[in-house]
Image (cartoon, rainbow, N blue to C red):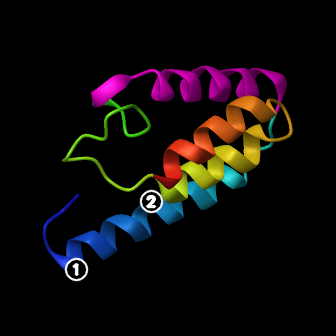
Amino acid sequence: MPHGVYAQDKSCKAEEELIAKHREITMDSRLVSVLQKQASLLIDGGPSSGLGIPIPPQSVPMHSFGHYLFKVLLQYNQNLAYRVGLRAMR
């Protein structure tokens, strides 16, 4: 996470813009499969992942990204969606 408040705000805005662009993409079976695989890799990634255990000190908050993944995955894989949601909220 950037050190300054301005840089943190700018980083969060960029993340929100990127997620908004992703929401415009129509989900198909291939994209859902990729998202499920990536979400699983993030959860199992250990300390090098923002959704792994333990939380690395240099990581950025995963709330926005976790919320996006949760909403997308909820329709297709509820168990994975809730695992992502719980990890992102800690």
Under circle 2, the secondary element is helix
Under circle 1, the secondary element is helix
Q: Which residue is mark 2?
A: 15
Which of the two labelled residues, at mark 2 and mark 1, occupies the earlier sequence position?
1
Using the rendered view, name the quadrant where residue 53 is placed. Answer: top left
Q: Is residue 26 above or below residue 76?
A: below
Q: Is residue 6 above or below residue 49?
A: below
Q: What residue is rendered at 19% in x and 47% in y?
A: 58
Whether 40 is among the magenta residues is yes
Name the residue at the left extreme: 3
Q: What residue is rendered at 80% in x and 43% in y?
A: 26
Q: Position of residue 70 (x, y in %)?
A: 68, 46
Q: Is residue 26 left or right of residue 4?
A: right
Q: Is residue 84 above or below residue 79?
A: below
Whether 57 is among the magenta residues is no
Q: Position of residue 89 (x, y in %)?
A: 51, 54
Residue nearer the viewer, 28 or 48: 48
Q: What residue is rendered at 55% in x and 25% in y?
A: 38
Q: Is residue 69 left or right of residue 90?
A: right
Q: Position of residue 21 (x, y in %)?
A: 61, 56
Q: How packed is label 2: few (under 14 Cα within 10 Å), some, or many (20 or more)?
A: some
The quadrant in which the N terminus is found is: bottom left
Q: What segment carries the magenta color?
A: 28-47
Label number found at residue 34: none
Dominant secondary structure of the residues highlighted in magenta in the image: helix
Q: Is residue 22 left or right of residue 57?
A: right
Q: Position of residue 5 (x, y in %)?
A: 21, 79
Q: Is residue 68 above or below residue 38?
A: below
Give the residue type at disc 1.
Answer: Tyr
